[in-house]
Image: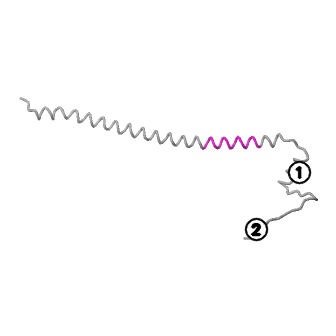
Amino acid sequence: MIKMKEVKTAWQKPNMLITIVLSLIMVVALGTFISRIMEYNDLKKEKEILQREIKACKEEIAALEYEYDSPMDDEYIESVAKDKLGLINPNEIVVVNEVIE
């Protein structure tokens, strides 16, 4: 007759093997899941950065289009000459503020 201990050990060996295999599968699945979550978070941050860059570029384009579409009248030409070339009209007073360090 088969003893009770022998029946238990014979029955436990396949169960233990199945448990080990299932545990390994779960560890691999969990590792894959965690790496995918980290990759998703990185891509989400990159998307936000790119969306901010797109918004800044659209604002710059709008400003350039406004400047391009503005009329070339004397007032515009005078403002560009003042900003870019330092034009000073005869009736204007120049104030220079220098900070000595």
Mark 1 vs 2: CB contact within 8 A? no
Q: Position of residue 47 (x, y in %)?
A: 58, 40
Residue at position x 69%, y 42% from top? 57
Image quarter of the N terminus: top left
SS state under label 1: helix
Residue at position x 76%, y 43% from top? 63
Q: Position of residue 8 (x, y in %)?
A: 15, 33
Q: Position of residue 38 (x, y in %)?
A: 47, 42
Secondary structure, magenta segment, majority class: helix
Q: Which residue is mark 1?
A: 78
Q: Which residue is mark 2?
A: 99
Q: How many other residues sit within 10 Å of disc 2, few (<14), some (14-19) or many (≥20)? A: few
Of the image marks 1 and 2, the number of the one nearer the N terminus: 1
Vertical side of 45 occupied by 7: above or below: above
Q: Seen in the image, is 61 located left or right of residue 41?
A: right
Q: Which span of residues is magenta-colored? A: 49-63
Farthest residue in the top direction? Answer: 1
The Cα atoms of the two marked residues, 1 and 2, are separated by 28 Å
Nearer to us: label 1 or label 2: 2
Q: Seen in the image, is 100 located left or right of residue 49?
A: right
Residue at position x 88%, y 43% from top? 72
Residue at position x 19%, y 34% from top? 12
Vertical side of 49 occupied by 15: above or below: above
Q: Position of residue 79 (x, y in %)?
A: 86, 51
Q: Seen in the image, is 56 located left or right of residue 84?
A: left
Q: How many other residues sit within 10 Å of disc 1, few (<14), some (14-19) or many (≥20)? A: some
Q: Is residue 61 magenta?
A: yes
